[in-house]
């Protein structure tokens, strides 16, 4: 298991099409989801939930995505439809982080949304800590109400991200990160 600081300093996303089996085992997945749930959650609302896509469920969900794509794009080619059908089959495991943020008497919706994002990031970091690689994506289908309904989301729910998890052959090159001088400011009153 990598050192936590080194892991956080070096973590990078791996494209879903570069992820292969094995995926996390059932016990490892339970660990990942437990860690994803241990995020700041003002009011103990659990303003998020998870949908796990593994095995044939990835293809079944992909059929729904392809149906909506085809309906929205009647001139789509067979290759384009197949690409959409395989959206969730590119990695051996995909976990949708669903935001259940909503109006609350004491907890701003913004805080609930941030908690959902924290759950997704914890999932990504935990996958890397277990030796897997991950990619957190929100592509068109994360925002399409017909896809969300087909995947079982309530009208008030949104996708915070689809986290694709698997094993990588090589680590991708790191991308340029902003220098701290460009993103850090010291408050001086």
Image (cartoon, rainbow, N blue to C red):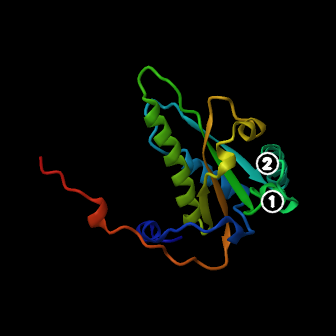
Question: Residue at horizontal 49%, vertical 75%?
Answer: 174
Left or right of 33: which side holds 115?
Answer: left
Q: Nearer the viewer, residue 168 or 102?
A: 102
Say which label, 1 or 2, has the lower sequence index: 2
Q: Which residue is mark 1?
A: 80
Callout 1: helix, strand or loop? Answer: helix
> Where is residue 124 drawn, in percent x and y?
56, 58
Question: Residue at horizontal 75%, vertical 56%?
Answer: 88
> Where is residue 84 drawn, in percent x and y?
78, 56
Q: Nearer the viewer, residue 142 or 68?
A: 68
Left or right of 110: which side holds 150?
Answer: right
Left or right of 24: which side holds 81?
Answer: right
Identify whether 56 is placed above or below 71.
below
Q: Which mark is residue 6?
A: none
Q: Which residue is mark 2?
A: 73
> Where is residue 45 drawn, in percent x and y?
52, 30
Circle 2: is it few (<14), some (14-19), or many (20+) Cα within 10 Å?
few
Circle 1: is it few (<14), some (14-19), or many (20+) Cα within 10 Å?
some
Question: Residue at horizontal 82%, vertical 45%?
Answer: 64
Identify whether 41 is placed above or below 20.
above
Quadrant position of residue 106: top left
Quadrant position of residue 89: bottom right
Q: Nearer the viewer, residue 154 or 106?
A: 154
Identify whether 50 is placed above or below 108.
below
How much space separates mark 1 and mark 2, taking CA atoms? Answer: 10 Å
CB within 8 Å, label 1 to label 2? yes
Q: Nearer the viewer, residue 179 or 76?
A: 76
- Which quarter shows the N terminus? bottom right
């Amino acid at each position: 298991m990598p050192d936590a600081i080194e892991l956080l300093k070096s973590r990078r996303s791996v494209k879903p099409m570069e992820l292969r089996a094995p995926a996390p085992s059932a016990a490892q997945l339970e660990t990942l989801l437990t860690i994803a749930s241990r995020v700041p959650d003002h009011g103990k609302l659990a303003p998020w939930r998870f949908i796990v896509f593994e095995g044939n469920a990835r293809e079944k969900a992909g059929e729904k995505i392809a149906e909506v794509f085809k309906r929205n794009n009647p001139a789509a080619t067979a290759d384009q439809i197949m690409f959409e059908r395989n959206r969730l089959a590119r990695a051996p495991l995909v976990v949708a982080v669903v935001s259940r943020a909503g109006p609350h008497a004491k907890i701003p919706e913004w805080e609930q949304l941030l908690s959902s994002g924290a759950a997704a990031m914890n999932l990504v970091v935990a996958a890397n800590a277990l030796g897997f690689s991950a990619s957190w994506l929100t592509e068109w289908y994360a925002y399409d109400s017909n896809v969300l309904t087909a995947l079982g989301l309530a009208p008030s729910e949104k996708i915070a991200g689809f986290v694709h998890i698997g094993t990588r052959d090589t680590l991708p090159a790191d991308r340029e990160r902003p220098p701290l001088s460009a993103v850090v400011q010291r408050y001086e009153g």
